[in-house]
Image: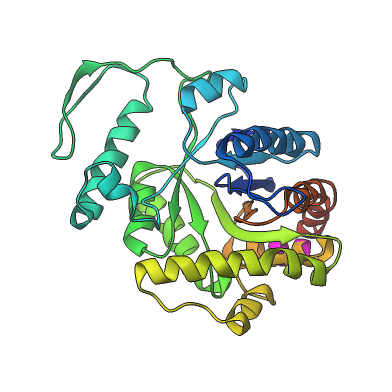
Amino acid sequence: MTDTANDRTGGTDITLGLDTFGDVTNDAEGRPLTHGQTIRRLVGEGVLADQVGLDHFAIGDQRYATLDGVSGGRAEVILGRGSSTESFPLFGYDLDDYEELFEEKLGLFAELLREKPVTWSGSTRAPLDGLAVYPRSESGSIPTWVGVGGSPQSVVRTARYGFSLMLAIIGGETARFAPFSQLFQRALEKFGRPPRPVGVHAPGHVAATDEQAVEEFLPAFEAVIREVSGQRGFSAPTRESLMRDVGPGGALHVGSPETVARKITATLKDLGATRFDLKYGMNGMSHDAVMTNIELFGTEVAPLVREMMEV
């Protein structure tokens, strides 16, 4: 993820960006793109996000020190246990070790961030004995956030390591996350850590009108959530429940530039956050709709949010 904000370590300035998993979109005839085409278009999306003045453009799984060098020291990392369980057998891990794996790997990552030779041992991977990792970052340590989806223990752990907190909100009322922001600040103080910012990651889509945004985004989002619910055993959302999330206070930031800007402003104020990353794009959406979303978010939504936050 690259970051064009001036203050990368905290502060009160509002920063706004986009977040994507590089979802496969469709061409003009409605045919899914290849993975190679998707990657090449993803680069174009990042370029457009930078051109329209957004502070962040986040993508999944890169070699961050290399990206940091290529971007002139603008890379950041958001770590999380993830809501996808499919990766555990892929890497030979047991899902029952979920908590232990994240605790150990987060601790190892914290050691690696010092960019000094690391001596470390644990139960989930081979030990390190005075080993250094290269290339090193531009600034000496890559700014790091931890994504939290609903666990108070994860909030406290984030504070213990002195990382910034990213609230990952996928559905339901955003205001229910306000206690996590408060807990985070109390935990930082308890551990003797300096203040750290709180950010919000939530799905959404911007189009010319509310109706167009819903029409372009919701069918694709609903299809993905229904598929995932079948795989993981939770109840699939109804169109009615998804529309409640599109409405005021809900997690889906979908609509016209003014609608989305007002909702982001309310989310930031409710949660005491200074950063918002819009998770944009879903499998099956048109690439034109995705690019329009990026342009509108940068040229219309972001300026409106900054203006509204000053009121």
Total labels drawn:
0
Is 110 situated above or below 265? above
Question: Residue at horizontal 65%, vertical 32%?
Answer: 40
> In front here: 124 or 25?
25
The C terminus appears in which quarter of the rendering?
bottom right
Which residue reaches farthest bottom? 240
Q: Position of residue 207 (x, y in %)?
A: 81, 60
The N terminus appears in which quarter of the rendering?
top right
Is 223 situated above or below 30? below
Overall secondary structure of the magenta section? helix
The part of the image, by quadrant, that contains residue 125 is top left
> In front here: 266 or 250?
250
Residue 309 seen in the current view: yes
Q: Position of residue 310 (x, y in %)?
A: 79, 56
The part of the image, by quadrant, that contains residue 128 is top left
Is 216 situated above or below 18? below
Q: Position of residue 37 (x, y in %)?
A: 63, 36
Is 255 situated above or below 118? below
Left or right of 81 in this view: 52: right
> In front here: 210 or 141?
210
The part of the image, by quadrant, that contains residue 187 is bottom left
Q: Position of residue 250 (x, y in %)?
A: 62, 74
Residue 10 seen in the current view: no
User: Which stretch is magenta?
Assistant: 261-265
Q: Is residue 262 magenta?
A: yes
Question: Residue at horizontal 81%, vertical 72%?
Answer: 211
